[in-house]
Image (cartoon, coloured by chain):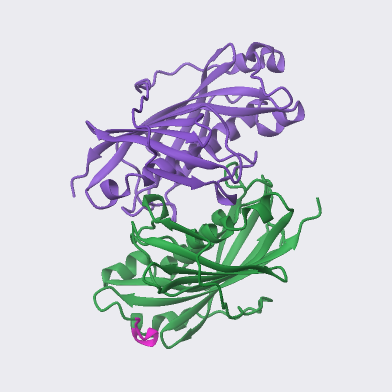
Chain colours: A purple, B green
Amino acid sequence: MPLYGSYPFSVEPFSEDFTGRLSWGVLGNWLLRCASLHAGQCGFGFEQMKQTNHVWVLSRLVVDLKQMPATGNAFQIDTWVSKVYRQFTDRMFSVSTTDGRPLGSAFSTWALIDLDSRQPLELSKVSEGGISHFLYERNLDIKGASRVRVKADVPVHSLKTGYSDLDINGHVNSIRYLQMSLDLFSDYICREGHAVYRVELSYAAETYCGETLLFFTDGIQEDRAQIDIRKSNGGTVAKVALLFQTVNS
Amino acid sequence: MPLYGSYPFSVEPFSEDFTGRLSWGVLGNWLLRCASLHAGQCGFGFEQMKQTNHVWVLSRLVVDLKQMPATGNAFQIDTWVSKVYRQFTDRMFSVSTTDGRPLGSAFSTWALIDLDSRQPLELSKVSEGGISHFLYERNLDIKGASRVRVKADVPVHSLKTGYSDLDINGHVNSIRYLQMSLDLFSDYICREGHAVYRVELSYAAETYCGETLLFFTDGIQEDRAQIDIRKSNGGTVAKVALLFQTVNS
């Protein structure tokens, strides 16, 4: 059984950002695609879980990639399940060139939600404990996420979610929060020569079509920006940390 | 020489919209990707044109697709150049299942811009008239675009462009205007059971990072919405028509 999923990609035209390198939005969705494909191959993917009225929900995503592959570059994403603990499971990702040179890594934490009760399931009871048969051990050099604390109490931006933000569940796609957060620092990225090399996202609630999102941030401190994305009732939807490096042009 | 480019795709997880079918945003970018790949194979792609300080600019895009392929479905996009006339060239697209059943079609009109003068080139003089050696004749059943005229003089929405909107040229990606336009009708699409089956876009100017876009529309009339996207100085950036059909759920 495929303990280890390995998926080839190539940076095609219209998947790049303004620098000609793979955009964070496309990379993020490709990571989630690999998670979904590999879970499906293991027997606990989106379609299989739907049959029992369950859906995977992303709780945390950390991606660390010092340099994005550029237009035309081939690369691969390897993914595996590293841990199952109570209501959560960790899935790791390694991003490398096709000849094995590491480009970066990522980890994600998922919960399985019952669509009626909206409660997370005890994962040892799902598929007769089947998920834990798919654990794979491989050391991955990626730091854990720091806590995101934002002091600002006035939003720097707000937006209403729409059709293009939604995923197949009808919720705002997890990666859209990353894109919206990056867009708060467009000048810093596009005009002032900085690139994001690491992102940390934690997800607290789902957003539906037509909801208003408020963005709170204290700005950039020591090459790190923290964003608290809240609904208009004040509840946090997602917390995001972006880590910047200066680009040598 | 490859007069005819044929590119396989499959609707992978995280390329769908909330209905589980390929999203308009992803389809749009895949069409542009095919255009770019095929132009590259013919010798007049993005990289080749960059060497002479020229860049292809999309002037018009019409896509007609009665039903989007669904998750897991394989399909292909065929593309070819159908016409070269003065400063413009037409490129056609046929979208079909891998066993040849037509799903829809598209056409696009492009100009080649000199990056210094910002003027379009006479295409018969480019690559020693080489582009016209790549003309291919195939009948495609797709209606021309109607004129978009919007009477409203108060914008229904405005937004500031950011990092995630940009393409490799540093301009707002052509397909983002489609996504932004679709988002104006999110309720109609997501709650009231309508799907877009045809889009018509014409592009008048480029937008850079940090510019404000204003959206003008008279709403939906006879299953058609028209949107005029303008800069804050009043100049039109793009005009968009969306054609809706009722979804049988």
Looking at the picture, tell me which residue is in the foreground, B164 or B226: B226
**Image check: A101 left or right of A204?**
left
* Residue A83 x/y as whole percent: 52, 15
* Residue B149 x/y as whole percent: 57, 78
Q: Residue at x 57, y 58 (%)?
A: B184
Q: Residue at x 69, y 47 (%)?
A: B19
Q: Quadrant of the N terminus of chain A?
A: top right
Residue B43 showing in the rendered view: no
**Residue extending farthest right:** B248
Magenta stretch contains residue B170 = no
Is A86 situated above or below B190?
above
Q: Quadrant of residue B6?
A: bottom right
Q: Residue at x 62, y 53 (%)?
A: B186
Is B34 situated above or below B233?
above
Q: Which residues are magenta?
A: B120-125
Total numbered labels: 0
Residue A208 showing in the rendered view: yes
* Residue B218 x/y as whole percent: 60, 70
